[in-house]
Image: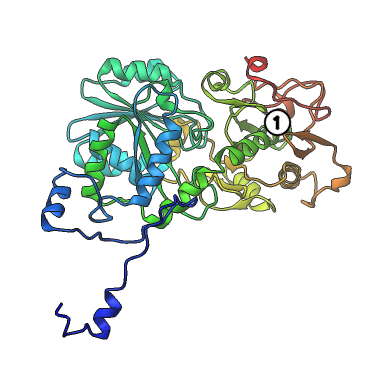
Amino acid sequence: MASDHPPGENTRAVHLPPAPVPAQQPLGTPVYRTAAFAFSSSAEYAALLSGETAGYSYSRIDNPTADAFATAVAALEGHRLPGPTAAQGFASGMAAISTVFWTFTGAGTHVVAPAAVYGGTYGFLRHVAARFGVQADFVDVTDLDQVRAALRPETRIVYAETVANPTTAVADLPALAEIAHRQGALLVVDSTMAPPVVCRPLEHGADLVLHSATKYLGGHSDTTGGVVSGAPGLISQIRAVRIDTGGILAPDEAFLLRRGLETLPLRVRRQCSTAMLFAAAVARHPAVRRVDYPGLPGHPGHQTAIRLFDAGPEGTRFGAIVSVTPHGGRQAGYELADRLRVGQVATSLGGTHTVVSHVASTTHRQFDDAALAAAGMDPGAVRFSIGLEDGEDLIADVHQALDALAGHGDGTEPDRAELDRTELAGTKLSGAELSGAELSGAGEAGGGTAGRLDGPGGLSGTPSLGSREERA
């Protein structure tokens, strides 16, 4: 602009001085809240769009903050792998899941998925992908013979969940990887319920691992997002489809999710420890028909979890999801959820609050009664996502709800002073003491069956999660 023609006020307002680029690395992740990026020339713009040079042009394609989150997740998922790991962030977990299927399946191809798969994944495969000629069979992926029998020449993906939502079934990832690869298919694993501080499926043969980052990775129920990690060659294909379908993770969400990763071990360790004692305490209540939690030795996936999941000083981390099925069917499940006072009826999981949902009417509402039965889900099941509250408060809360459900009380909370206390990993837990009791999923204590707490000692004494060796 000619020096004798100074810019007007509107031009001056639009063309402000650029923000400084600090020479020092900021401790917090910068948020690039911009849709577009400027270039020094048209040639630079063209070179970037053609892939000749790296950089950023438009935030639907790539964004530095979204990449910062994806790179961080890749580092957590692949830190023990010999080769590089890459990742892509998405606007939600379902955006990540659907993009994986859009990338590696097409008309005439086939998917093998769990009968107890997350309802959103079931709905996508059954009602969306099917319209484009993708076929799917839903089987019990813990039964490897069923998985083998479901394979076809056109199978492209064997899909699994590290810990199933909400049945808590544990997938034998190395065995599934061998089956999938022998067929020439990919093993894709949703590990939302078992974040990288619990299990890293890529280390066990999975080709891709995905998360609803909304859950444990973010950890505070204040943002939505998804992420897929794997070998760079696979991730580059996913990125191409993500660009065309528009599921990019926004920069503000990426900032919150990346910040959540910094406290992931602290949060998940506490949640897993509390969940272990919560499951053991609830399992003996006479109003409870079934408790599903991999930490209970009678759980069908208990030994698989010990083999695949990380152990810290507190013992093996079995996750923080506990599914409780009361006697009385669907209505009893509604009443159990509604009578809680600390646990809240709410969507999602993996945050600081303990939240509950009646499974058949919420997360798996896409399932009819036949599909629920095939997946091993009782219509009365209630999923507890254990948060960061004091364990003694959670146990007292569920006990008062179950007492009222069984007609053994008026639903008032017991006097905390009368509750025995035990301590685990710095968390006091009421009414969960198990001295002399043997944790056994085959027991019939209180009239229940699988995943129950059995033993002559009742609820007295002190439990110990023990080391990995002690649990093996």
Residue 299 percent coordinates (x, y):
59, 23
Residue 366 percent coordinates (x, y):
40, 44
Instruction: Look at the image and tell me whether residue 367 can be seen.
Output: no
Q: Identify the colour scheme used.
A: rainbow
Residue 268 percent coordinates (x, y):
59, 38
Residue 244 shown left or right of residue 274 in the figure: left
Residue 434 percent coordinates (x, y):
79, 27
Quarter occupied by the C terminus: top right
Residue 387 shown left or right of residue 97 in the figure: right
Residue drawn at the location 56% of the way across and 25% of the way down: 310
Q: Establish if 275 lies above or below 315.
A: below
Quarter occupied by the N terminus: bottom left
Q: Nearer the viewer, residue 326 or 161?
A: 161
- Tell me the residue that label 1 is attached to: 280
Instruction: Look at the image and tell me whether residue 70 can be seen.
Output: yes
Q: Nearer the viewer, residue 351 or 381?
A: 351
Disc 1 residue crowd, few under 14, some 14–19, many 20+, Cα 10 Å: many
Label 1 residue SS: helix
User: At label 1, which amino acid type do we have?
Assistant: Ala
Outermost right residue: 418
- Total labels drawn: 1
Q: Establish if 12 lies above or below 433.
A: below
Residue 446 shown left or right of residue 296 in the figure: right
Q: Quadrant of residue 330?
A: top right
Q: Quadrant of residue 51?
A: top left
